[in-house]
Every structure is written in C-alpha cells, then in structure tokens.
Amino acid sequence: MSEYILEMQNISKSFAGVQALKDVSIRCRPGRVYGLVGENGAGKSTLMKILAGAYRADAGEIIYKGQRREGLSAGEIIDSGISIIYQELALVPRMSVAENIFLGREPRHAVGVLNLKALHQGAAALLNRLGIALDTNLPVSELTVAQRQLVEIAKALSQNADLIVMDEPSAILAGSELDQLFGIIESLVEQGVTIIYISHRLDEVFRIADEVTVLKDGELVDTRPIDQLDRQTLVRLMVGRPLDEIFPRTEHEQGELVLVAEDVSTDTILEGASLELYKGEILGIAGMVGSGRTELARALFGADPLTSGTITLAGDKGASWSNPAQAIESGLVLVPEDRKSHGLFTSLSVRVNITLPILSRVTRFGILQSQAEDEVVEEAKVRLSIVMASADQEAQYLSGGNQQKVVLAKWLETHPAIVILDEPTRGVDVGAKFEIYKLMRQLNDRGIAIVMISSELPEVIGMSDRILVMNDGRIVGEVAQEDATEAGIIELATMAGAKAKVS
Amino acid sequence: MSVAKPYESATSVGDWPLRLRLFVANYGVYIALVALLLAATVLTPRLYDVNTIAVVMRQASQLGIVAIGQTLILLVAGLDLSVGGIFLMTSIVVADVTNGRDELVIPAILIALALGALVGLGNGVLVTKRRVPPFVATLGMLVLVKGATQAYTKGVPGGFVPDILGIVNQSWFVLSIPLLLWLGLNAVFIFVLRRTAYGRKVYAVGSNIEAARLSGISVDGIRISVYILGSCLAVASGVVLTGYVGYVDRFIGTGLELDSIAAAIVGGTAFVGGRGGLLGTIAGVLIIQILSTMAVLMGLDIEVQFIIKGLVILGAVTLYSLANVEE
C-alpha cells in the first residue's frame, strides 16, 4: 500500500464546454490536515464533488487506499470511508441528535425494530470521543449552528470516515467555537484521520493545515508545506497578483450624529442595546455567532418589533419607524447576512430585483414608468459593474458574485443615509472582498454611515472607526479603532455571564 | 466569459442545452396548444364549427375567470380550494335575492361579491396571521361555505334564477358575454401584474417572502388582497355558471376548483409561487377545455377524459422542471 491514503491524479472536468478543472492532482497522507484554498470558482468545490461522487471526472483517476476507484455511487463512497461536510448542513431539524447521527444506518434489533438504547449509547460515545457534551435526545432544531456542525462531524465519524472533507466549516463559527473545532480536528488527526479543509480564512489555514494546495481558474497553482508559506505569498498564489492586504482607509473627522438607538430590546436575545451612529463612519459590530448581532441589525431596521427602547434619526428630522418600509423611507437599509434566502428574488428579473424597494420612484399612480425604471437599472449596472445578459435575465442565472451585486445595488438605489451590512464579505473571495471594502469607503465619502457586522476580526478592526462588542444579547463594550486588538475583542465577546451578572 | 467561473458560464445564455430548456419552459404551453389545434383538424374537425367554437369559448370563460384568481393566488405561493363553495353560494344568493326578478340582478351580484370578499378575507387571514397552510385553510373554508349555504337553504334552495342571466348562453358569431368578460378581466390583470407596483409586489412575495418583507413590502396585505381578488373572481365565474345552469344546482361548478389550479399550472405558473402569468393560464384553460370537448366529440368515456387530463398536467409539470438550473 502506498504512503498516500488518497491520490487524485490529473483530474479534469468541464461543464457545457467550460473547463472547471484542468489536470489537477492532489495527494494526501493519512493523519494530516490539507488546506484547500482558492478564489470563488477556482474549482475547490468541483474537485470535492468529484471526490464525493456527485460529479464524474472527464479525465484522471482517483486512487483511494491504494486502489483505483471507479464508478462508485455516493453511498458506496461514504461506506469506503470518505465523508464530506458541506457548508449547507444536511441534518433533519425535527429529528434528535442521535437519530441524525445514525440516519439511514440505525442500529436494529433482530427483527428490524430500532434499537433505541444502542442508538443513544452509540451517539453519546461518538460525541464523547469529540469531547462534546450534548443531550442526544434533543431535536437538532434546538441546537445552535455551531452545535449542528459538531453533530455533522459526529455523523462523519459514525461512518468510520478515514478522510473528512470540511467545506468552509468556519464560515458560521467564531471564537471559542472555532477553537473547539480545531481541537476536534487535532484529535481526529491523532487518531489517523485525514482532513481536507476548505476555507476562505487564511488565518485558519495557517493555524490548522500541514500542507496547502492552491487552485486558480480550475488549475493547480501549487502545493506547499505550510512552513514554506507566508500570508503574502499565499494571497499572491491565490489571486495571481500581489494584493495589498491593507484595508483601504480614508481620513475623515467624525461627522454629525445621524442615528440614536436607546435601550433597544426585541422578542429575541437582544436586550437593552444603545448606540449612536455618525455620518460617514463605519461602526463595526463584533461578537460570537448568536450573540445578538443580527438581531440588533433587524431591530434597527424595524424587521422585528421592539419590546422596549427607541430608534430615531438625529437632527431636525427625528423620524422613527416600526417596519422596514418606514425604515427605507427614512433612509436606513439592511443588507442581510443570508443574501440568497433573505435578499434575492431568484425567479425574478434583475430589473424587478433592483427596483423593488423604490417602486414609488419608478411608478406614477401605481403604474410603472419604463423610462424611469431603465435609468435606475442602468445606473446600478454601471455603478457596481454587474455582468448580465440583460436586465430581464432572471437573477438565478447570474453568478454568485453578480447576485450579491444585485442585492447591494437594490439597496444603494434607495439612496440611503445609513446602510447596515450583515457579514458583507462572507463566502466572498479575496479579490471581491477588496472590491466591497472599496465600495464601503466610497459610501463613507458620500457621507453614508455604515453599520458592519462581521465575524472576521481582522476585517472589523481594519475597516471600522469604532467597534461595538456584543455578548449574550447585550452590547458589552465599545473599542476605538486605534485601540482594537483581536485578543481584546475576543475577551469582551466571550466574557462569561455578562448578562447574568446584570439581571 | 472567463474560464474561472464554471457555474456562471454553465448557466449563461451561451449554454445551448439550458437555452433550449428555457425555451421549452417558456413557450411549451403555446406549442402544445397549437399542436392540439392541428390534431383536432384531423381527429375532430367538428371542433371548428362556429357553434362548437362558441360553446368551447363560453365554457373556457367559466373556467378562465376563476383561473385568473387562482393564478394570482398561486403567484404568492398560495392555493384556493374554496372557490367551489363560492360558486354554490353565488348561485343561491342570486336566486334568493332576485327570486327571478331581473331588476335585482345587480344588487344580488353585489351582495355575492361582498360575501365572496369576506370568504377571501377569511382565507387570507388564516394563511397570513394564523399561518395555516393554504391547502388546509381553503379546504376548511370550502366545507364551511358549502355547509353554511346548505344550512341557510335547509337543503332545498328557494328562489329562481332571473331570466336575464340566460344572456350568458347567447353567442354572436363566437362572441359571448362570458368570453368578453374573460378577455376583459385578463386584459386588466395582465396589465396589473406586468405594469403596476402591485403586480411587482405580488411576484416578489411569491418569489421570496422574507426578502419581500425586508424590502418593505406589506407581505400579509398583498397575500390577503390576492385571496380577496381570487374569491371575487370566483363569484364572477359563479354568476356565469348560474346563468348557464339556469337553476340552483347543488353540484354547480364541481371540478372547476381543481381544473382552475390545473389550468394555471399547465400554463406555467409555479406551485411554489413567484413565476408564471396569465398568458400561460389562458393557454392552459384552452388546452383543458379543448381536450374535453375533443374527447366528447370523439365519444370517449369520461374515465378516458380524466386520464388524458391527468397526463397533460403531469406532462406540463415535467416540462417545467427542465427549466430548473439547480441539480
């Protein structure tokens, strides 16, 4: 048997005549962590889907555990010890933790009746092996996103996986959850499991990977041991050009006050949040996933009814609102975190997507004015350089990056004074991130105030003028940009019982 | 397009298989309609008698008017089974209020419209405020309305249908009042859906309700209004049906609630909302109506008619699934 558990050799794959992967080879030794990085569309997911049996390669071969693998179904591949944890978790919400872990492979008594005792004991043993304390009876719908991810890992283990692929596992994790994930990866590796780790976050790759493979435009750029790489080199390999990683900054004085929120609570975890927002600044909101950041954004936008507190525009306007329509009218917009499910109308045209919040501007007596609408769409297209066949193309047929631009365009066309961005660069590649940062600065220069929620601390620190840290539904601290450190923010964000002490 | 983004390229307009699939999904129903009309020239040439055409058009109008409402409701990812109850209710209100007197037709129709709007409001409130699935809410409403009308008449409908309503059975060449009403309502609602802010909101709510809410649209208001419109259109259909039957029939319009859904679906309106429109529904209505007329002309048994109708619905849904880009 060779020293490699997996060899994918000269893999090529094209979709409808377009080369998605060209002659890509990777090799993995047992008990090591392989980082797989590259911009969106570089071919990472396609390569892993070929490994999982979801796609069939046009050329090349896969040698797994010393044997050429051919024509296996996805189920047979799982049985052979390859497990893939996708970004979109594949759990059944109403079923318990134990039932999910053993879904389709439940332990049975002789006559085929479920062996519930073995089911729960088996699940508990697996969770134990991962060092997780979780009630195996709980329905998955009751779990946090981070806990669900751990259940997915337990499920992979229950399939006796020797090779686990994690597709951006950290996109939904932060802080201590991430530490827990890395701890689990380390213990898996000690047990001889091989991990392929796909991530956009280079810090994590440096922290966890033994070797890094870089893909670009469907081709293999290089595979190097991590100790022969530094951050700058890796970024250069990924984007194919040296990228100034410094966040774009513009010097400006603190503008006038535009928004005041006082003691805001909603029927969610959010409790007693107060903040002030100034013209032309970026106010960063940091905190763990589930700390109430998104809830704060929704409250400011009027998407969730307030149970206490007030939100008003500063100055002579003094407007307040209780629903998104009024918020938009007052010049405040929210670009939601989950753009595909909360932002985009996939079955509708780009035109309809963009003009939806400003229908009153492109209609007269409720009737659409084609010319006014065309002008708005053209302006948006040019401003954000949206690539589309025509404005009547359905949004679902655009690329992911262009879909995001359509959502952004839609909100910018309302000519807002305040923009709330919830995870603006999540799942976005390095090049596109930089474009978004530049756009945010342009908005600042036009006097627009931005509230930016982000799980990526370098981004929060690099972009924000001030940073509010949330913990357990409350704002627990404010840090000025020049004083901000990752360690300091993490400490505030993870301080135990911040809420319990007060109430 | 660059080689860098396989998904973008694979789904761009240069992709012939996808273009073909989209063409089929967009125009398949019209092609099917033309094919059916061509087939009829050989199989049932009698379909092209002026009198037959007039009858087909009158019947298509009965179905078509309800189908307009059904399309609107499907567009917001809803469904309305209660229209069957509304036909019966309309028929009874017309007979009861007028008791055969022509001059009371207008007040009777207005009362029926008001009651219909109330049923639609009930459907809408159940679906939006109580989050009852549309199938369950409107099924409950169907049973409730049928039960209430029968309780009111004690099972023996009184009153007479005024003679003037018999006008719906008259044709001038192929034109008739029901046909003109159907065409007029289509013109109005096609304009509303395509060229007004309200229409845009209907599509947005059906396409992505959460995004619509976050875009400042009153999603509950839009959905309730659509259910009310659907019920009022069912009343209009009910008036035509009443004039057609000429008396209060306990089984009036039976089957039309499901046929109206089928017509919209065959015409390309998505069951999950946000996609489709009235031009497709018109074609869907004509296909269903012409098929059953052809079956009658060919002397086929009623079971065979059902089998054909079923195959048409399943075939249409299979065709539309081709346009889905997600694997």
Image (cartoon, coloured by chain):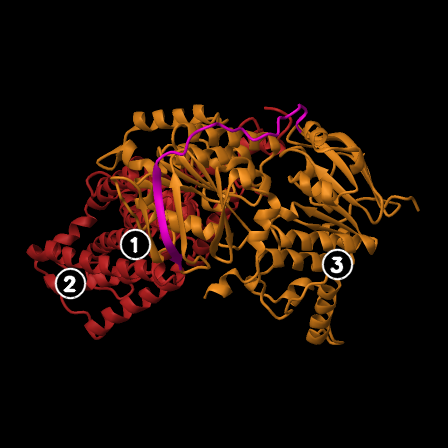
Question: On the image, numbered disc 1 is attached to which residue?
Answer: B224
Report if residue B3 lies within the magenta region: no
> 10 Å neighbourhood of mark 2: few (<14), some, or many (≥20)?
many
Colour chain A is painted in: orange
Mark 2 chain: B
* Residue range highlighted in magenta: A239-266
Mark 1 chain: B
Please indicate whether residue B254 sits to the left or right of residue B39 in the image: left
Q: As shown in the figure, which amino acid type bears the numbered disc 2?
A: Ala
Q: As shown in the figure, which amino acid type bears the numbered disc 3?
A: Leu
Question: On the image, numbered disc 2 is attached to which residue?
Answer: B95
Q: Residue furthest front?
A: A483
Question: On the image, numbered disc 3 is attached to which residue?
Answer: A157
**Location of residue B70 in the rendering, given as x and y in whole percent from the top left corner:** 34, 51
Say which element carries label 3.
helix
- Is B101 drawn above or below residue A13 in the view shown? below
> 10 Å neighbourhood of mark 1: few (<14), some, or many (≥20)?
many
Quarter of the image where one finds residue B93: bottom left
Please indicate whether residue B82 sits to the left or right of residue B169 in the image: right
**Location of residue A38 in the rendering, given as x and y in whole percent from the top left corner:** 68, 34
**Which chain corresponds to the colour red?**
B
- The majority secondary structure of the magenta stretch comes to loop
